[in-house]
Amino acid sequence: MPTVVLIPGLAADGAMWSAQLDALDRLRGTRIEDVQITDAHFRCDALPAMAAALLAEHPGPLVLCGASMGGIVALEACAQAPQRVQALALLGTTARPDTPEVAALRAAACALIEGGGFEEMIVGNLPFSFHPDRLHDAALVNLYLDMLRRAGAAQIVRQNIAIAARADRRPMLPSIRCPTLVLCGDADVVTTVEASREIAQSVPGAEFALVERCGHMLTIERPREVSDALCGWLSARLSARQAANSRRSR
């Protein structure tokens, strides 16, 4: 059975996967071997190194579940070791490189942080992270801001530099052969519905679903809906794979 590795987004830690970790734990021993959260993005300076560290630290067959930047790391790991990835879940992510406009916004954010505007930057990012209806949810907003504060200014700048240098992964999408789930908030303005739909249409047999009334941080904004979708998909796909393997071994 594979190990599920949950890959957080930029400057995010295990708190963004808390609900899904609890839900996936119920599949342990029947569909999956274990569930773990990687922090490779905090320890490596470039996406290829993050993916290589993840693969080295989690041996054997894997299910990679990445959100936002975590999905980009998952695609990089799939490029490095496709034979080890038994299933792939990409949440609120993109296979595209930065556009010049996004690159300019990223550079401006880093300059603001380095100029002492860390708190201004992270608070200013809230409307891009959540559905407008959730911006007054103090518990949700504080969970998000506390993650970024734990990461700190230097990590946010370093991870932005890493993600800005990423490769265009769209050409590799048709070669992915493992079961793939693509989820996106229907109001995501960071990694748009169009970018997620592009992944789902390019990966053979991929499944695509929108999370309603949801922005970019879907794992914490709509934790139950995301957990239900992820666990239902994974249980069905791994059950089918295990049944096929059992038939072949007879």
Image (tube, grey):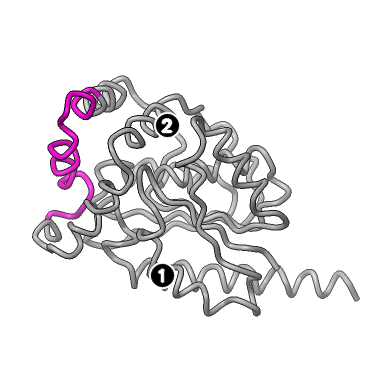
Query: Which residue does the image show at 36% across and 31% down from the upper left?
Result: 160
Question: Which residue is rendered at x = 13% and y = 40% of the image?
Answer: 124
Residue ID for mark 2: 163
Q: Is any atom of residue 89 visible in this view?
A: no
Q: Is residue 121 magenta?
A: yes
**Residue 249 location (% of width, % of height):** 88, 72
In the rendered view, would you say 71 is above or below 139?
A: above
Residue that extends furthest to the left in the rendered view of this protein: 136
Q: Is residue 167 left or right of residue 243?
A: left
**Residue drawn at point x = 33 percent, y = 44 percent:** 151
Callout 1 amino acid: Ser
The residue carrying pointer 1 sits among few (fewer than 14), some (14 to 19) or many (20 or more) residues within 10 Å by Cα, namely many
Along the viewing direction, whichever of 71 and 113 lies nearer the viewer: 113
Inter-mark Cα distance, 2 to 1: 26 Å
Q: Is residue 125 above or below residue 180?
A: above
Quadrant of residue 80 within the rendered picture: top right
Residue highlighted by disc 1: 227
Which span of residues is magenta-colored? 111-132
